Amino acid sequence: MTRARILAAGDEFVRTDLLTRALDAELDRAGRSRHRVSVRTLDLGWPTKPWGKVGEVVEAAGNEDTMIAALDGVDAAVTHLAPFTRRVFEHAPDLRLVVVSRGGPVNVNLTAATRAGVVVCYAPGRNANAAAEFTLGLMLATCRNIAAGHAELGSRTWPGHYFRYESAGFELRDATVGLVGYGAIGQLVARLLAAFGARVLAYDPMAPAEAFGAEAERVEDLDDLLAASQVVSLHARQTEENRHLIGAAELARMPAGSVLVNTARGGLVDYDALCDALDRGHLAAAGIDVFPAEPLPADSRLFTTPRLVMAPHIAGCSREVAERAAAICAGEVRRWLDGQPPAHCANPEVLSGSATSGTPGTSARSTRR
């Protein structure tokens, strides 16, 4: 009978009880009698305790010493934000699987995991629907003056000026909306916009041709998309090459009175240039959920820029996301227990040599010390 020791390291979003409940459901599905599994738990306390850089990994919660102690004798770990650094892997000789309930395992040192023979899995698409819905929310809040009107009512004034023609917002129906990035989230946004009756353009040099269907027209040049769109919404992954993809020149190409929405990554936009465009009235508004530094520093110019709707990086946050993420993680553990290939592996090069080290109850990893 197979033996496995699993660590469920949750936080206040992807809670530990969600992880353990999902693991129980998958074990029952697999036939619990086939496996002797013990689960230990660890609560990391994010977001009450902020995340940050831990060792050489980013966006992690907790510390290396706590993880090393929790991983003693553990074969597999499921987590949202726990740090898996080089030092952690060096002190966790039994560990053979790490599953991160995020769209990418940014809290894992993949090089160290691969060197250690540890399979790393992740949960792509866990928050795609939530982020797409939130994107539409920011579009409506900016295009229709919802947030600005609320702010003025909060100061106990009646903002009648929104009924002036020049101050009135515009509808998404028949508007042209440009999407920069056309992966899972961008495609869902396009479907939602199609229901509103918008014309959708999409720019993504990496997307396959078959990704573009009836909901969006493919545009080959970013400048062309910017010039044609009343709303531009960002859905690209951030890389070294596309930092400040939207800067002063790109904002100037957008039509006067247009709107920028960013729920992707803060580094895609030059926010000083965005503030300039809003200050001089070139853009009607902007909706932002992501920032270069989080939390925002108290002296950030963004706090005083007009017609800027901000949210604290919560586009991908819903109860369903947490539940879905836990279920995806548990599914990877079940596949590992059953000797099946993972659905989403971040270091597939480990798999070709993990036939023994990836099977519960073996100790092949001891040969690499």
Image (cartoon, rainbow, N blue to C red):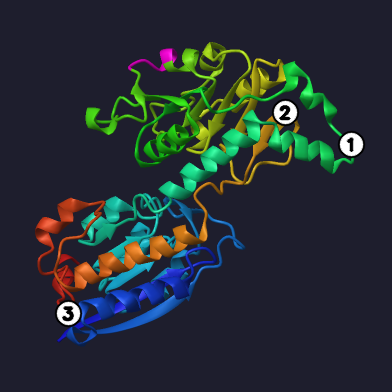
Q: Which residue is mark 1?
A: 157
- Tell me: 178 left or right of 114: right
Say which residue label 3 marks.
361
Identify whether 203 is placed above or below 298: above
Residues 162 and 208: in front is 162
**Does residue 258 appear left or right of residue 10 in this picture?**
right
Q: Secondary structure at mark 3?
A: loop
Question: How many neighbours does mark 1 have within 10 angstroms: few (below 14), some (14-19), or many (20 or more)?
Answer: few
Question: How far separated are the C-alphas under marks 3 and 1?
Answer: 68 Å
Task: Tell me the mark number nearer the camera, choosing from 2 and 1.
Answer: 1
Which secondary structure, mark 2?
loop
Q: Which mark is residue 305?
A: 2
Residue type marked 2: Thr
Quadrant containing the N terminus in the rendered view: bottom left
- In percent of the image, x 35 and y 81: which residue is there? 39
Q: Please provide percent x and percent y for residue 277.
A: 64, 18
Task: From the image, state whether disc 3 or disc 1 is nearer to you.
Answer: 1
Point out the tag, 3 or 1, that comes first from the N-terminus: 1
Judging depth in this view, the residue of 260 and 85 nearest the camera is 260
Q: Nearer the viewer, residue 262 or 92?
A: 262
What segment carries the magenta color?
220-224
Estimate the spatial distance between the alpha carbons at disc 2 and disc 1, rounded to whole Å. Answer: 20 Å
Question: Left or right: 118 with respect to 283?
Answer: left
Any part of residue 289 in sight = no
